[in-house]
Every structure is written in C-alpha cells, then in structure tokens.
Image (cartoon, rainbow, N blue to C red):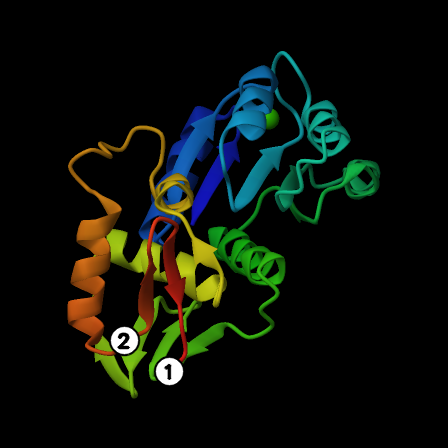
Amino acid sequence: MRLLLVEDDTELSRQMRLVLEDAGYSVDCSFDGEDALFLGENESYDVIILDLGLPIMDGLSVLKKWRDQKIAVPVLILTARDGWSDKVAGLDVGADDYVTKPFQVEEILARVRALIRRAAGQASPELCCGAVSLNTNTSRVAVNGMPIKLTAQEYKLLSYMMHHPEKVISRTELTEHIYDQDFDRDSNTIEVFVTRIRRKLNVNVIKTVRGLGYQLINE
Ligand code: CA
C-alpha cells in the first residue's frame, strides 16, 4: 500500500514517514499544497494524509480540487485542536476521516488501516484467502495458522492483493501501489516478488493471468 503524506512541518513529516514505513507502507512526502495537488492527480495512492494548513495552497482547496476531478482516494485530514470548523469543512469537501493535532501516531496508523479496509470493501482486519491469512493490524501472514516470514516488499505486494481478492491486477498497478517515488524499481521486478511469495506460501493462491497480470484465487 502506498500513501501520500502532506505535512509542511518537516520534523513531524520525517517522524510520521518513519512510523508509516515501519508499518509496511510506501510513503511519498509532500510539503506544500501545489505539489500535493499534482501528486494526488498523477500518482496512485491508497490513502492520502493531508494537513490543512499548508504553504502555497491550503489543504481544503487541494482536497476540493481532487474531489471535483472525481479522484476518490481516501483522505485523512489533520486539523488543529480547536479547529472544529475545519473538521466540518473538511468532511463536507470530501475528507473520509480526521485526526486532531497533536496526535499519537498509533491513531494515525489505526485510521489509515481502517480507511484502506473500507476502500477495499473489507470489514475485518484479518484478510483470508484459502489457507492464507493476513492480519492488517499486526502485519502477520500465516498459512494454515503457521506464520510465514515475508520481506517488506513481499508483504506490500501480498497485502495489496489480499485487499483486492479475485481482481485481476496488472504489474503496472502493483508497481504503482507498492513502491514509493524514490524506489529503484528496475532491480525489483514484480515477477521476482511473486515467485518468492509463491515459494514461501507453498499454496497456490496467486494465479498468473496471461497478458493481464495476477489474480488472487481461493482454491
Ligand atoms: Ca501545517
């Protein structure tokens, strides 16, 4: 899963990025409204975390422009402590949730998980496909209850697929949702990750759909 973090406080952004990456997300950071608007319009994100007070263009204007263009990505806004009117305005413009500053990062993580689940139509934090289970709260993967150790990139790929069962997912879509902007994509091809995941899981849940991509199947 790939997130866009829009926060102009560079120290707060740095800390949040570390925590989010630690939790298994690929993170792009943006520090002003204009840049954020561009990235939201041109890149594929699973959640956008959007501070409202931003240089060049404020967060509410950015959000409104995305929604006017039918960009439906879940957006979590960050608001000031006494900013109840910001919360109302943000939700009315199309935000999906909000967190009030100052916050505990655990709250951000929990809300991001919930937004990703909801967008994928998943109610439970435990995603299952046949013998394979993936717990989005703990980032644990198991086959028939036995824990499986995946690398961060392997987990990102499997997590994206487990959130979208039965859907045929192209390599391009997987690439867009598991790497951040700065990642060296050439040396880390999707095919290599899929092969490794299949070997580790040792059950046939990832099907290759010729010419189209991959599909998670429950056999
Ligand atoms: Ca700010």
Figure quadrant of the C terminus? bottom left
Q: Residue at x 32, y 51 (%)?
A: 22
Total count of labels? 2
- Seen from the viewer's position, the closer of residues 113 and 171 is 171
**Location of residue 214 in the rendering, given as x and y in whole percent from the top left corner:** 36, 58
Q: Residue at x 61, y 15 (%)?
A: 55
Q: Could you classify mark 1 by the number of other residues whose Cα lies within 10 Å: few (under 14), some (14-19), or many (20 or more)?
A: few
Q: Residue at x 41, y 61 (%)?
A: 161
- From the viewer's perspective, is 175 left or right of 73? left
**Location of residue 185 in the rendering, given as x and y in whole percent from the top left corner:** 24, 34
Which label was assigned to residue 219?
Answer: 1
> In the structure shown, which secondary structural element does the residue marked by tag 2 occupy?
loop
Point out the residue furthest to the top here: 56
Q: Quadrant of ligand 1?
A: top right
In this rendering, is residue 149 above or below 46? below
In this rendering, is residue 82 above or below 142? above
Tag 1 and tag 2, C-beta contact below 8 Å: yes
- From the viewer's perspective, is 165 left or right of 144? right
Q: Residue at x 83, y 36 (%)?
A: 89
Point out the residue furthest to the bottom here: 144
Look at mark 2 in the image and give the residue it sits on. 204
**Location of residue 118 in the rendering, given as x and y in whole percent from the top left corner:** 62, 61
CA gap between label 1 and label 2 equals: 7 Å
Confirm or reject: label 1 Cβ below 8 Å from ligand 1: no
**Location of residue 174 in the rendering, given as x and y in whole percent from the top left corner:** 38, 47
Amino acid carrying mark 2 in the image:
Asn
- From the viewer's perspective, is 43 left or right of 57? left
